[in-house]
Image: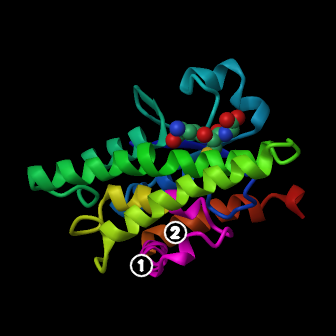
Amino acid sequence: MIPTITAFERSPDRGRGLARDMRVRWALEEVGQPYHVRLVSFAEMKEPAHRRRHPFGQIPTYEAGELTLFESGAIVFHVAERHRGLLPEDVNARARAIAWMFAALNTVEPPIVERGMAILLDHARSWHQERLALLEDRVRTRLVELSRRLGEADWLDGAFSAGDLLMVTVLRRLSGSGEVEKYPNLSAYVARGEARPAYQRAFDAQRAVFTDNPANG
Ligand SMILES: N[C@@H](CCC(=O)N[C@@H](CS)C(=O)NCC(=O)O)C(=O)O
């Protein structure tokens, strides 16, 4: 059964692979699972047909047979559970890899998203610069902590896992800010993720959605 995922018809990131379908595509590529993509416009995402797939009217979603899932973390976990290669066999190592999945989405991603939203939506507010400084501090705290824990290791806990896959995609959301580059080990960690052939296939596929759309000139 070939699953179908959803992605932006016109991603605001202009094909830089920052939208959350990227992590799902990457997971599917890592395990060698082919997939179909249903592209949705912003208007379609808010219509009942898509809200049946995703209660919050967002991407990505995942459909395979009778199963419909939303939330990128839940989808990556589902893929990792059903295929070999993204979670260790050893029970304790598996639990630790899952903890890193949660850490990526629950501890590291929120301040990064808050910072991004503030830049996007609040730049005209009188208090913007003051709040941005505060949010950037919160991001830096997490980066310092993550950098310390990663140390000289290639991946967060032994072999590459779904925890690394999510963490790399979360750190990539800071692309262009120069923040990750302040921590050479984190920068190298992201580059290691991006160098994986599965990452590159996923990246090229999402980029093609942007480049193949004549409206993007
Ligand atoms: N926690 C959700 C967040 C989903 C999300 O924010 N998706 C964004 C794209 S990366 C979206 O659909 N934004 C459009 C909107 O919210 O209208 C996940 O990880 O899947």
Task: Give residue 201's mark.
Answer: 2
In the rendered structure, the answer to whether residue 49 lies left or right of residue 12 reads left
Q: Residue at x 67, y 68 (%)?
A: 177
Horizontal and vertical percent for residue 147? 39, 69
Q: Residue at x 41, y 31 (%)?
A: 65
Q: Is residue 188 magenta?
A: yes
Horizontal and vertical percent for residue 118? 72, 46
- Kindly identify which residue carries mark 1: 185
User: Start and end of the magenta stretch?
Assistant: 170-195
Horizontal and vertical percent for residue 122? 80, 43
Q: Say which amino acid is labelled 1.
A: Asn
**Crowdedness of circle 2 by 10 Å Cα count: few (<14), some, many (20+)?**
some
Assess mark 2: CB under 8 A from ligand 1?
A: no
Give the secondary structure at mark 1.
Answer: helix
Q: Quadrant of ligand 1?
A: top right
Which quadrant: the N terminus? Answer: top left
Q: Nearer the viewer, residue 78 or 125?
A: 125
